[in-house]
Image (spheres, helix red, strand yellow):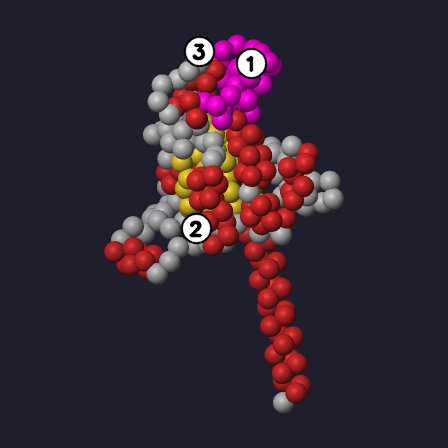
Amino acid sequence: MKRFRILTALLVVVVFSGFVFALAENGSESLTKLLDGNKRFVSGSLAQKDLGDAKRKELVKGQKPFAIVLTCSDSRVAPELLFDQGLGEIFVVRVAGNVVDPITIGSIEYAAEHLNSPLLIVLGHEKCGAVAATLEAKGAPEGNIGAILRKIRPAANAAKKKGGTKDEILETAIKENVKNTSKDIIKKSAIIRHLVHEGKLKIVAGEYSLQTGNVEMIELAHAGNKPSAKTCPSHAGQHN
Ligand SMILES: [Zn+2]
């Protein structure tokens, strides 16, 4: 009997460590899943989706999205379409200019911590109107739009400093803005830093092309997806 208990305990440990390992692998798997979906979208050979009554009823029990997508509200950048995903598959946070504040970071924390989504992709896009408006802004913008432009301004300033044609400056600003948003999330969320450090969440970034439909990855220097003494995200705030 005692031996049986020891064996059971050992089995639990083995299964549990396998589970943790599986979680650690999931971020990369989720990214492959998203990018495969994007390839289908670009080629026009979309996957068959179950949008029927049975699927809806099944999802009433709960959701387990395999990825979190933070992107712009732009009507041309619909994540479920461009990643060719169905109901219950991706947790989407959309805001003009794909910037973050406590509410959007809270939404990401909810999906990462409570729904166990192992991947976050911050997705900017070609010809983003919010970024273009920030580059062109003169004086105070009307209404609450200023709050968005203020978030994008550091990226716009960096792009102007780098220089180039008008289109090149916009393109640089779009990429810089995506990087800044990713940095912001890590800097302002202890929950996200912890999940990244534990290997439970992978953060990546990309840019969607309005013309081709393709999502191109943007390298993040700071995301700390492979924690080490140098890049530990728990200390990201110190070297950002
Ligand atoms: Zn946009």
Name the quarter where the N terminus is drawn. Answer: bottom right
Q: Main secondary structure of the magenta part?
A: helix
Q: Which residues are magenta?
A: 149-176
Q: Which residue is mark 2?
A: 65
Q: CA distance from mark 2 to mark 1?
A: 38 Å
Q: Position of residue 142 (x, y in %)?
A: 36, 18
Q: Which residue is mark 3?
A: 138
Q: Which residue is mark 1?
A: 160
Q: Residues within 10 Å of mark 2 (few under 14, many from 20)?
A: many
Is disc 1 placed on a helix, strand or loop?
helix
Q: Which amino acid is tagged 1?
A: Lys
Q: Position of residue 78 (x, y in %)?
A: 37, 35
Mark with earlier residue (3, 1): 3
Q: Nearer the viewer, residue 65 or 183?
A: 183
Q: Residue at x 51, y 42 (%)?
A: 120
Q: Which amino acid is tagged 2?
A: Pro
Q: CA distance from mark 3 to mark 1?
A: 14 Å
| As drawn, 98 above or below 1 | above
| As drawn, 210 above or below 170 | below
Would you say residue 42 is visible in this rendering? no
Q: Which amino acid is tagged 3?
A: Lys
